Image (cartoon, rainbow, N blue to C red):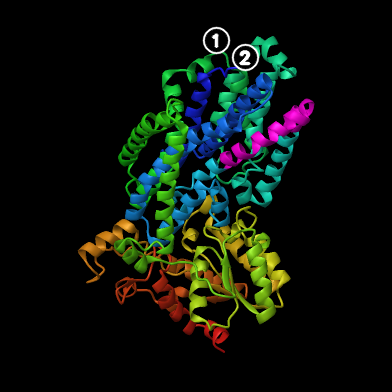
Amino acid sequence: MKITYRPEIDGLRAIAVGAVILYHSQITIFGYQPFKGGFIGVDIFFVISGYLITSIILKELVTTGSFSFKYFYERRTRRILPALIFVMLVSLPFAWMYLLPSSFVDFSKSILYSLGFSSNFYFYYSGQQYGSESGLLKPFLHTWSLSVEEQYYILFPVVLLIIFKYFRKYLIHILILGFVISLSLADWGSKNHPSFNFYALPTRVWELLAGSILAYFEITGRGEGVRVRFKYKILNLILPSVGLFLIGYSILFFNDTMFHPSFYTLYPIMGVCFIIWFSNKNELITKILSTKLFVGIGLISYSLYLWHYPIFAFARVNQFIDGNFINKIMIGLVIFILSFISYYFVERFFRNKKNNFYKIFKLIFFLILIILMLIIFIIIKDGKVNKTNVFIEKYISSALYREKCKFSSNNYNFFNEIFFKKEFLNCKKKYNEFILILGDSHSRTLFNSISKISSKNEFIIGLNQGGCRPFDKNYKNCHYLNALTFINENKNNIKIILFTHKGSFFLTNYNQLPINEQLNKTINYLLEIKKINNKLLFIGPHLEPNVELNYKSILNFLNKNNFKDNTYFKDNTNFDLIEVDKKLKEVSKKNNIKYISKVDILDFKFERDFIVDNNFTFSDTNHWSEFGEVYFGRKLVFNSIIKDILFP
């Protein structure tokens, strides 16, 4: 039974890859990003994959009664690995040029895990939140979805063959049951374990099974769905349009803050299913999706998906596309040109059955071996293989401090971290009391400062998650609500709670929340902590120089100035924070909350404190560098009551 080519499915692929690229390009129109839901393009790919893979397997089982694993995995190998390896090989020199050592190691590990079909687990366990700013700088973050599909390709044929052979008459019931269980698990996971939920196969497989169920009914010709499809012609004319509307609605109105994948994700999944099931050559949407433009983009969609993310990532690292629409257009052209080359000279060549698979396999094995040797070398050298980048990272790095009984968690749901629980209980048994440092990314900087300055025998815990505000304590991806529980459970073991976070958001209606309301909610949260444990110090914001420190600006500075002076950088210090500091002093005093002013204690002067002893004290526009954490940290500790806590 030959599989019939359906051009409209390639058209669907075009929509899927287009949505993903528009989402990652972060195109802004009049200050608004219209494609915030473009990430659902990946979900569209999953449904299509489930439909096509199940069609291939079932048709072979129905017609021959058996299934050739060898032929199946040969086709998957020809389809997936050559283009992926090609992108990896081309990306490595750019990673060497543009990535700082720590990022280069992370990049190398992501390639390693991607080749092992497990990069989704790597990004999950490394704490990478998809859609965050940091993720946009990781060239191979997008391979998580390939790993999910590859895991499905490995497991699903085996499972399907067993069910077909021994429980054939219950096959559709098992597929539907799997769909329901996975969808229910995904909806629960989106609220309780959103990061794992996003990356893992068990909570994604329902999307693949949606396509599998369609394939089953199509091949067996059984079920009410088949009768509806042929009996009610009006549905064939209407539902593809409804499907396209659901997909379009999701792309335009979904966003990163929603629960996903979850019941909400049913909208685009149903849309894809409507188009696959009800499309026909006489219907308008089918005709549009079958046009040369859509089919052409669909054919190169795999290459487009592979190329777009690393190109965007390297362009962002090098600030090539920051606020420059023309440069974004140029990058788009580069993505399409490389994708054409990749499709016509790599994908088609390796998928051509005339080319002996044994020879292809040897070539793939050889190229993987080269990549592995390069990656192992990079990891052993700790990413320090480009002297310029090593030099730059030395001046602007701010790695998370790590020592026994001094550790931080940036996971909102830190209660479920096996490492956190084990380490915490061991250290609690040893030291009994600990210092808790709570807040956003600025509290992580404070955690580094306190950890480096304190004695080796101090037990310090950091609950520090970037971008999280205390007035959003119920936000599902933030840790503030869980922190209250943690403080309550350990109130007798807490030596002191140091709370700090970025102050400049008080200058704007952050997330459309009025400034006074932000302030009141922040103070109310601190009062909740104080009720549980009175040992609270509120540490106010420091002045932010707002000077863009990045790969490009530091490289230009080193070439032009070589630390003779810092006039290369313009003093853009945010002095408005002095007023924020005054207000925080007032409300803290009014509510009997102990307050420490960084503005007063640090007395930041740009011309004096931005470059000290040939070192930058900041790592970006507002966070301290590794040097700055000690430089400012010593001032903060030794000129405040924190000194009496750490050095009684």
Picture quadrant of residue 619: bottom left
- Helix, strand or loop at label 1? It is loop
Cα–Cα span, label 2 and label 1: 9 Å
Q: Do labels 2 and 1 touch, CB within 8 Å?
A: yes
Camera-nearest residue between 156 and 257: 156
x, y (%) of residue 413?
64, 58
Amino acid marked by disc 2: Asn
Residue count near mark 2 (Cα–Cα under 10 Å), binned few <14, some 14–19, many ≥20: many
Write down the residue under mark 2: 236
Residue 179: in magenta span = no
Residue lying at 41% horizontally and 50% vertically, measured from the top left: 371
**Rendered view: 106 above or below 301:** below
- Count the labels in the image: 2
Q: Which residues are magenta?
A: 148-175
Residue lying at 46% horizontally and 61% vertically, measured from the top left: 504
Write down the residue under mark 1: 282
Amino acid marked by disc 1: Asn
The quadrant in which the C terminus is found is bottom right
**Rendered view: 27 above or below 418:** above
